[in-house]
């Protein structure tokens, strides 16, 4: 049986929007255009600088939020301050009754990919713009950065620990997106509760300093207290004072079966080598080394040859490692069956409802994405395997029951990264990993 995320959401998500969405609605209701059947599409015109692919994330959270997008009296009390009575009454009965298709959560995307297609009346679709974009832009940015870090780590354990570096309500969403992209665990307990992400934690410098007294620091007492409470499999933080002495004290207190030591400062590559040699000399050959401290995908890649067993990543992860938004937009592309397109310089859109397929070699390596009119036939080829990218998410306002679980999406990311051409995994700037072709 497929499981779904059961996010704890506010009573209503209707005010997680911009005021102009509702003033546009009011104007459309007034001039009679509100009920025209439309298609809106979510896409990114380009990838963030230096990126070669993106990870579509947030669809599960988007659908949970859509289910709670209702205007009840508290929400209407805000809306009626700037809307006329007809618009307020329309919102009172609002319920999305249209259709939504989208890329599976965890799917790769590229410039122009029609990641989400929303169809219904102008009125019911336009009010969802801000909500959909805020979720998809945030989660896709985090997942895309996380996937690059996972690739750089080459199979080593990854722990998300960025809660203190982002908004408290964004922290569990960031942990979810990181786990989807291949991280192994999170320090954020709300993400553990809400999304079932495995939890992990070590210790803080404060705990070691707590055991200081007028007669000096008592690192051994701190380590002893942690081990008595958490067992010998715990991870001790050894760089509060002197790392070499910290490691020696840790093994003296815990013995050679200590689970791990964490290094949070200094030249992590040099220190990891020194600590590994010291641990091995002390007989602690199975004690793991965890490193943390301002890591990003580049720092992780630089540590690939070092004896590091796990990485703890915070700030760079929850800020998208330099790209805090995925740059996705939500544009009207069709009205009553007629394609419409924006022509503004550098902000162009392509008219018409679209679908997309991805071509791959028999080996599984992807070679091209093709975006084509939804009213036309899907591209065919004998040379490559063809996979449809858009899947039903909502039909007639009803969310499709059989949607993928977070674990399903996590596995899709892993398969997607394997399918990229080898140059697509490079961290250096370059063109998107595969080209996107648009058929008229």
Image (tube, rainbow, N blue to C red):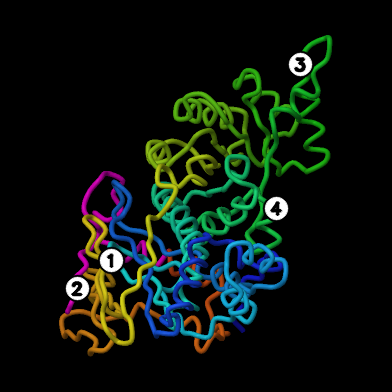
Q: Which of marks 1 and 4 is in front?
A: 1
| Location of residue 371 with respect to 196 vertically, above or below | below
Residue located at (47% from left, 37% from top): 295
| Marks 2 and 3, the one that precedes in the sequence | 3
Crowd tier of the residue under label 2, counting other residues whose Cα lies within 10 Å: few below 14, some 14–19, many 20 or above: some
Q: Distance between the residues labelled 2 and 1?
A: 9 Å
Kindly identify which residue carries mark 3: 217
Q: Position of residue 152 (x, y in %)?
A: 39, 47
Kindly identify which residue carries mark 4: 189
Kindly identify which numbered label has been placed on residue 410. Answer: none
| Location of residue 278 with respect to 90 vertically, above or below | above
Q: How far apart are marks 1 and 4 (CA)?
A: 36 Å
Kindly identify which residue carries mark 1: 112
Query: Quick check: marks 2 and 1 in contact, CB under 8 Å?
Result: yes
Residue 436 is covered by the magenta coloring? yes
| Marks 2 and 1, the one that precedes in the sequence | 1
Q: Position of residue 114 (x, y in %)?
A: 33, 72
> Which residue is more in the foreground, 230 or 380?
380
| Marks 4 and 2, the one that precedes in the sequence | 4
Can residue 439 be seen in this snapshot?
yes
What SS does tag 2 mark? strand
Kindly identify which residue carries mark 2: 438
């Amino acid at each position: 049986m497929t499981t779904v995320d059961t996010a704890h959401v506010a009573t209503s998500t209707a005010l997680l929007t911009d005021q102009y969405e509702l003033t546009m609605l009011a104007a459309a209701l007034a001039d009679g255009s509100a009920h025209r059947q439309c298609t809106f599409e979510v896409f990114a015109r380009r990838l963030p600088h230096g990126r070669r692919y993106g990870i579509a994330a947030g669809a599960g959270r988007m659908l949970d939020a859509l289910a709670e997008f209702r205007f009840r009296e508290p929400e209407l009390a805000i809306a009626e301050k700037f809307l006329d009575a007809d618009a307020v009454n329309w919102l009172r009965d609002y319920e999305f009754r249209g259709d939504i298709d989208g890329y599976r959560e965890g799917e790769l995307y590229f410039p122009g990919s029609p990641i989400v297609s929303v169809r219904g009346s102008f009125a019911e679709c336009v009010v969802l713009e801000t909500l959909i974009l805020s979720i998809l832009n945030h989660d896709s940015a985090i997942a895309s950065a996380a996937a690059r870090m996972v690739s750089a780590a080459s199979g080593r354990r990854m722990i998300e620990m960025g809660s203190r570096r982002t908004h408290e309500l964004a922290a569990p969403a960031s942990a979810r997106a990181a786990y989807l992209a291949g991280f192994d665990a999170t320090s954020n307990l709300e993400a553990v509760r809400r999304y079932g992400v495995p939890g992990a934690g070590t210790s803080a410098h404060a705990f070691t300093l707590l055991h200081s007294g007028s007669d000096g620091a008592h690192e051994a007492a701190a380590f002893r207290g942690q081990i008595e409470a958490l067992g010998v499999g715990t991870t001790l933080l050894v760089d509060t004072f002197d790392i070499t002495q910290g490691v020696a004290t840790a093994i003296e207190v815990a013995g050679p079966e200590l689970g791990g030591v964490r290094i949070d400062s200094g030249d992590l590559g040099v220190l990891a080598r020194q600590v590994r040699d010291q641990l091995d000399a002390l007989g602690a050959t199975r004690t793991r080394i965890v490193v943390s401290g301002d890591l990003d995908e580049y720092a992780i890649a630089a540590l690939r040859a070092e004896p590091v067993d796990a990485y703890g990543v915070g700030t760079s992860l929850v800020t998208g490692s330099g790209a805090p938004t995925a740059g996705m937009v939500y544009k009207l592309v069709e009205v009553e069956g007629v394609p419409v397109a924006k022509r503004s310089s550098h902000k162009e859109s392509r008219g018409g409802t679209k679908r997309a397929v991805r071509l791959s070699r028999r080996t599984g390596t992807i070679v091209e994405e093709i975006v084509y009119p939804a009213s036309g036939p899907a591209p065919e080829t004998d040379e490559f395997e063809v996979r449809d990218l858009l899947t039903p998410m909502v039909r007639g306002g009803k969310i499709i029951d059989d949607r993928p679980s977070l674990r399903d999406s996590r596995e899709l990311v892993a398969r997607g990264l394997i399918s990229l051409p080898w140059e697509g995994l490079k961290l250096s700037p370059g063109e998107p990993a595969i080209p996107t072709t648009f058929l008229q």
